[in-house]
Amino acid sequence: MSATDDRPVAANSVRDVVLTDNEQGTFGGRVQTRFPPEPNGYLHIGHAKAITVDFEIAKEFGGVCKLRFDDTNPDTEDTMYVDGIINDLAWLGYPVDTPLFASDYFEQLYEWAELLIIEGKAYVDEQDGETISEQRGGYGNPGVESPFRDRPPEESLGLFRRMRAGEFADGSYVLRAKVDMQSENMQMRDPIMYRIRAADHHRTGDAWKIYPTYDRAHGQSDAIEGVTHSLCTLEFDSHRELYDWFLAQLPLTAPAPRQTEFARLALTHTITSKRKLLKLVEDGHVDGWDDPRMPTLSGLRRRGYPPESIREFCDFIGVSRTNSRNEIELLESFVRTRLNKIALRRMAVLRPLKVVITNWPTGDDGEPIVEEMELVNNPENEADGTRLAKISRELWIEHDDFRADPPPKYYRLTPGREVRLRGAFFVTCTDFETNDAGEVTQVNVTYDPATRGGTAPDGRKVKSTMHWVSADHAVDAQVALYERLFSAEVPGDETGDEFDDLNVESRELLLDCKVEAALSDTSPGQVVQFERLGYFAHDLDTPMLFHRTVGLRDEWANIQKRKG
RNA sequence: UGGGGUGUGGUGUAAUUGGCAACACGACAGUUUCUGGUUCUGUUAUUAGGGGUUCGAUUCCCUUCACCCCAACCA
């Protein structure tokens, strides 16, 4: 997905590595990548970057990218997540027919483990986890070799086979690689290769009693699949040495895959830790994994983010080794740019205020007449055509669009002022009514029949144009407005606890909205622009419930913010 | 504390072998407009600090500092 316009192509440190490999013929020009999620949670915006890096690099060089589930830890994994991930991937634009599973390689991995034992490169340790951890030493401190490190291979082999047979309890034995207890790289201090787990695996059930660790399984799964470029995030940098070590012990015929790291995506006002996302769900701060406030792909989908805009964003931010945090506003700008082109315009009144056109004509039956106005569906795309909307004597307008006592620079309706009702008429406010609390309950206006369609024959101008819906023809709707889920740019930056920055008012549900009739034809998931308000996504399940995807740029809001 | 990684505007990313610091978002000012939207224009940086080599340094050298990652039988 390289840039097609005159924009400079975003940096891509991974591309540079592939380019170099191709020049040097490391893999004979082959490029194969993989996206390797663990099925223990749903995909989020951070994964979207990894996904585009993995898939787009492969595409760019005429290679393939496969989806492989790294399902080596039965305790946390579930088929539900497998399905969810495949689903989200397809929505993002990367459909996968035949996912791969690390668990399919368990037998091969096991055989290679026996090989290492026989060659004296792995041994069974029977110390407890705490002891092993202590012996690992610390940064700058030497490691201590396990008393079982030089156990004869035959003995280790016997023990390892009994581990597999299920003769031992969880945690009683582990298989360790015999690497270097004095290495400056902690990953190399005899890492665990296999541990005993009595758990039920989501695919292999109880067939296995022992499970390989990530470091043990990952690189070798890559090798089994023929991966050339194993792309991952920066925190695995220190694992690369181990990744290479394991592969170097194997009787591989093809060149070993190469691990290359890049910086993970971080966004302001957003968390992407799976554990904390799960906590948001479990503690009821959000409705679920697909709550529109969640940074999950399913949440963004419900929120109305076009998948293309996420891909364009990922392409734009580039790939580098610099730890950074992108502004959520940048992502939103891609959403707006895309939606501006494709979203149909509609009129919706979120906080209705009654307007009466006092000089509106009456028909022969004594009732106010009803007229139909032709409205443009999308000024950015003439092919979207027009629609008809009914108008009569009584209307709803936005509460914010009238002020009895207007502040400076207020262009909207106010006593004595003439404004335009979008695509309809010019109206002038004559007076208004209030309740006991002094709140405005109704605005009375007169209209100028000569301005039908929205232009004055005499060429006079108005300062502002407002959206409206006919009171008799409006449809009821509910609208969810969203603020950032975390109020701080970097959640937890002050206190260390992200949840201290949780915005408890991140959702405002408006139950009594009045929208134009055409909106009842909106399909589930469709995103439209409510004119002057923003982009809104029709809920996937509940009819006439709309989620604000993102607001429009709002100059007036900025003016008020500066004052306030 | 040992090792590894990274530092370019408010933010993110660019800048052949050293040669006018570019693009986008945001902000601000203006323009256009039947959306305070859109469009278009302008403004917004002595490249972490210090020193050195050079006619010339974001780029090469030395040095200081800051931030991130690593001591799970998680991935």
Image (cartoon, coloured by chain):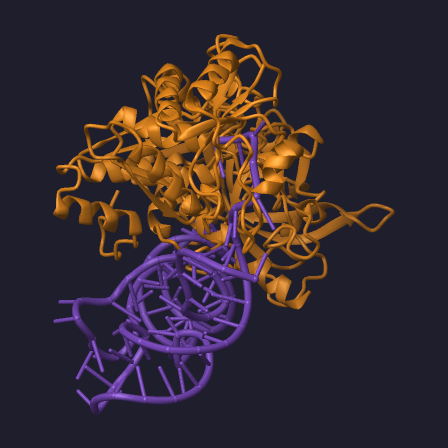
Chain colours: A orange, B purple
Instruction: Establish if A20 lies above or below A166.
Output: below
Q: Nearer the viewer, residue A405 or A116?
A: A116
Q: Quadrant of residue B55?
A: bottom left
Q: Quadrant of residue A305?
A: top left
Determine the residue positioned at 45% across, 55% down. A323
Question: Residue pushed farthest right?
Answer: A436
For residue A67, side relative to residue A489 (left or right): left
For residue A366, side relative to residue B30 (left or right): right
Q: Is residue A132 visible?
A: yes
For residue A46, side relative to residue B16 (left or right): right
Q: Position of residue A331 (x, y in %)?
A: 45, 48
Instruction: Establish if A252 lies above or below A338.
Output: above
Determine the residue positioned at 83% across, 51% down. A438
Q: Nearer the viewer, residue A414 or A190?
A: A190
Q: Nearer the viewer, residue A61 or A116?
A: A116
Q: Position of residue A395 (x, y in %)?
A: 62, 38
Q: Position of residue A93 (x, y in %)?
A: 34, 30
Q: Position of residue A221 (x, y in %)?
A: 34, 26
Q: Quadrant of the N terminus of chain A?
A: top left
Q: Nearer the viewer, residue A288 or B68?
A: B68
Q: Quadrant of the C terminus of chain A?
A: bottom right
How many discs appear? Answer: 0
Q: Is residue A361 visible?
A: no
Q: Quadrant of residue A377?
A: top left
